[in-house]
Image (cartoon, grey):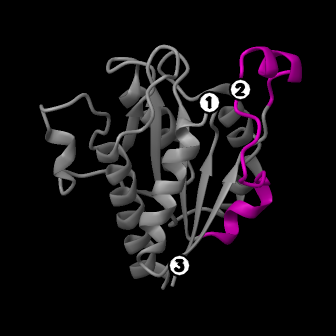
Amino acid sequence: MSRVLVLYYSTYGHIETMANAVAEGARGTGATVDIKRVPETAPAEVAKNAHFKLDQQAPEARVDELESYDAIIIGAPTRYGRMPSQMASFLDQTGGLWARGALNGKVGGAFTSTATQHGGQETTLFSIITNLLHFGMTVVGLPYSFQGQMTMDEIVGCSPYGASTIAGGKGERRPSQLELDGARHQGELIAKTANKLFG
C-alpha cells in the first residue's frame, strides 16, 4: 500500500483536528499515514500572546522527507485568502526537490479553515494546489461524491477543491461532524488514488 503524509500548519488547533480526520480517512484504505506539522516561525512571545496552540502532538516535518511519500495532503488556515507564511516558508525550501522532479507523479490535495464562510477558503486551497501542480503532482479534491457539502441545513465548509472548516472570528467554532466527514472522505480518496498508482 501507499505511504501518505498529512502535512499541516495549525494556529489554534482547527487544522490539527482536520488533519487527524484526513489521516483517519486515508488509513481506512490500508495506506501507511504519517501526520507532521511545519515549524512555527512566529516569534515565541507573539505566539504566546496571541494564544497559539503550541502543544500539538505531531512531530515537525523536514523538507527532505517529502520525496519518501506517495501522497502529500497539505492543510493550512487562511491568511487573507492565501496560505500562511509558516507553510509558505516550508514549501519555499523545496526548490531542490522541484529541480530534481522528486515529487513528479505523486498525489496531492489541500484542506483549510477560515474564520467566516467568505473568508477565502477556495483561494487558500488554490494557493496550496498551485504548489502541488508546480511539483508535478496529481491533485485530488473533494468531489461531490461527498454530498455533505451541498447541505443548506447548517453552516458548513468544504468545496470541490478540498475539505475545510469555519472557525469563527475568535476561533470559537470547532470543526463540525459534517466537515470532519468531508476531511475523512478526501483523505480516503487521495489514499485510494495513491494505492492504485503505488500500492
**Rendered view: 153 above or below 141:** above
For residue 131: magenta? no
Residue located at (72% from left, 56% from top): 97
Residue 95 at what x, y percent from top left?
Answer: 73, 46
Range shown magenta: 41-69
User: Secondary structure under badge 1?
Assistant: loop
**Residue closest to the eye, 179 or 131:** 179
**Residue closest to the eye, 51 or 138:** 51
Q: Which mark is residue 52?
A: 2
Q: Which residue is mark 1?
A: 12
**Rendered view: 57 above or below 166:** below
For residue 62: magenta? yes
Q: Earlier in the sequence, mark 1 or mark 3?
A: 3
Identify residue type, mark 1.
Tyr
Residue located at (76% from left, 35% from top): 54
**Rendered view: 57 above or below 188:** above
Tell me if label 2 and label 1 are in contact, CB under 8 Å: yes
Residue 90 at what x, y percent from top left?
Answer: 73, 40
Q: In which quarter of the view is residue 116 placed? A: top left
Residue 34 at what x, y percent from top left?
Answer: 64, 65
How far is the residue under mark 1 from the one under mark 3? 30 Å
Would residue 113 appear left or right of 53 to someone viewing this image? left
User: Secondary structure under badge 2?
Assistant: loop
Identify residue type, mark 2.
Phe
Q: Is residue 119 visible?
A: yes
Q: Nearer the viewer, mark 3 or mark 2?
A: 2
Residue located at (53% from left, 46% from top): 17
Q: Earlier in the sequence, mark 3 or mark 2?
A: 3
Q: Which residue is mark 3?
A: 2
